[in-house]
Amino acid sequence: MGWWHFLKHDWVSMYTSDVWVGFGADDPLHLDSGGTLSPVELAYETHGQLSPQRDNAILICHALTGNAHVASIPGQPPGWWDGVVGPGKAIDTNRFFVVCSNVIGGCAGSTGPSSLNPHVGVPYGIQFPVITIGDMVRAQHALLTDLGIPQWHAVIGGSMGGMQALEWACMYPQQVNAVIAIASTAKLSPQALAFDSVGRHAILSDPHWNNGFYYGLDVQPHDGLAIARMIGHITYLSDEAMRLKFGRNLQQRPDYGYDFNTEFQVESYLLYQGDKFVNRFDANSYLYLTKAVNYFDLEKKYGSLEQAFDTSSARFLVVSIDSDWLYPPHQSKELASTLMKLNKQVSYANLASPYGHDAFLMDNPPLNDLVAAFLCQ
Amino acid sequence: MISPLAHWLASHIPLGSRVLDLGCGNGDLLAHLQTHKQITGYGIDIEFENIKTCIQRGLAAYQGDIDEGLQEFGDQRFDYVLLSQTLQQVKRPTNVLHEMLRVGHYGMVTFPNFGYWRNRWQLLQGITPVTHALPYRWDNTPNIRVITLLDFQAMCQREGFNMTMLQPDGTTRSMGWLDNMRCEYGICCLSKGISS
């Protein structure tokens, strides 16, 4: 039964987020690719109250396949970071005004490839421009301005969310007081690029992907997307996590069937994850978002990591997970080292967990304590 | 409350110094220095729990192994680099000391002096010393080496470090001939170059 352990973090899309609309035709969102996007909708949720001084706002940035539903109130389906965000929790909504928005390019309410292209009246598909982490942040910045918040008390994220948090500090150095980047990096390793590439190839080679124009059709590129998700899940877990949770156990049969049915628990887990994923995620969004993560490279963008963070006035908490081989600790260390070279107020911790990259989304009291301690300063 | 030893070190650190504390533990010394000497700087410790405690106290701390070097830091980044009660636990002590003096002007080192008379007395009785400064039994000690003040002085000469003894009143002096016998701790300041 071990693998059920991994399922408790999933949600059902039955919450409602607010939708912000901006970047009209005369003021489009200018993208790093040189293109533009207009209009831009952002699905977002808020928790807690903005203080009269407007100084208690925290932006939480979600990871690759996340959404704006970061925390739930009674009666709602669980939020993806319910263990961390809420009244009296590490990110205490009695104290902080928490904002979480779905990234552009996603498929959970914000403008993405499955949104209607207003110029032609059909979904964008792959006519949607390629976006970057910087573009996501630029869109979030417009939301910040519209909410009337002068600066974030903190920007917090794990994995791709951590990339956004870091990019926030680089792009808007005076509007971010603190950054928490968990299991993140200033640029992905070639190994991580490789896994994302295989995931995209799985989608691109699915005949039902149909060059990205499958919206409204009977058949969807579910096989390709499910394989991409299965590959993703392999990279989110560590060798040890798989050994602990599945071992070589067989799912249903007492012994080998000598056929090609699903037998091992680990196979069954991956298939389950793949199947579940296709019902809530768009294949094109997966292409766009992995591309954004792959392009993310603060060194390339700013000349060097030092230059990237030079003008930031934020304090930083960088956290890695010791068994995370997708966003390995040495990348977080390099980030923290650079910030120390720049004399920034920075702390770095390497969390012990056997669960690999996934650990940042799991119930993890030491991580919660660390986040709470940092925010209390 | 900080230990008398930490107090002793703190008395030697001028207001507003840039300080790096190696093996900072729960951040007692750094917190004291931040409050009373308005220092800026970082703590480094290998234990997650210690990093957490430091963050809770508003200190900047980095979880790392000082034996791996201090590549994070440029040359002469700090005024003082502290290594308090940690030297006896590092794998490559001379490397660590050289790194300390690369990234800082002064290195302040404290260690339990194995040449202290009580240690010698217990050794004479045929037992491994257990004292206030060396509180562990042989089978549960985290210390991987024993150091006497004389050993330390000889090493400093070999490695080209200037070494002075730090006094509890904030002054310094050179090592005297009885020190190795009467000091429970080595409490020393290291520097490179002509004067110390």
Image (cartoon, rainbow, N blue to C red):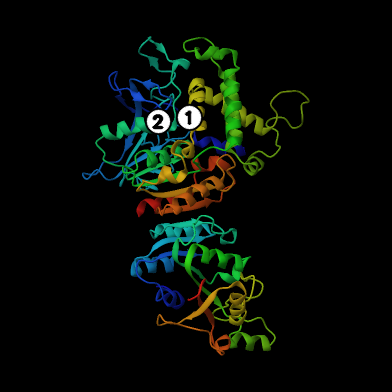
| Frontmost residue, A48 versus A187 | A187
**Split into 4 quadrants, where in the image is the N terminus of chain B?**
bottom left
**Outermost residue, left side:** A52
**Which residue lies at the image location 69% right of the left edge and 40% below the top edge?**
A247
Q: Position of residue A360 (x, y in %)?
A: 50, 43
Secondary structure state at the residue bearing disc 2: helix
At label 1, the amino acid type is Ala
Q: Report the chain holding disc 2.
A: A
Q: Position of residue B39 (x, y in %)?
A: 37, 65
- Above or below for B152 versus A42: below
User: Can residue B24 be seen in the rendering of this structure?
Assistant: no
Disc 1 to disc 2: CB gap under 8 Å: yes
The residue labelled by disc 1 is A292
The quarter holding residue A99 reads top left
The residue labelled by disc 2 is A136
Q: Position of residue A152 (x, y in %)?
A: 32, 42
Secondary structure state at the residue bearing disc 1: helix
**Which residue lies at the image location 60% right of the left edge and 31% below the top edge?**
A195
**Which residue lies at the image location 63% right of the left edge and 89% below the top edge?**
B121
| Frontmost residue, A114 versus B156 | B156
- Above or below for B119 versus B191: below
Q: Position of residue A254 (x, y in %)?
A: 74, 32
At label 2, the amino acid type is Met
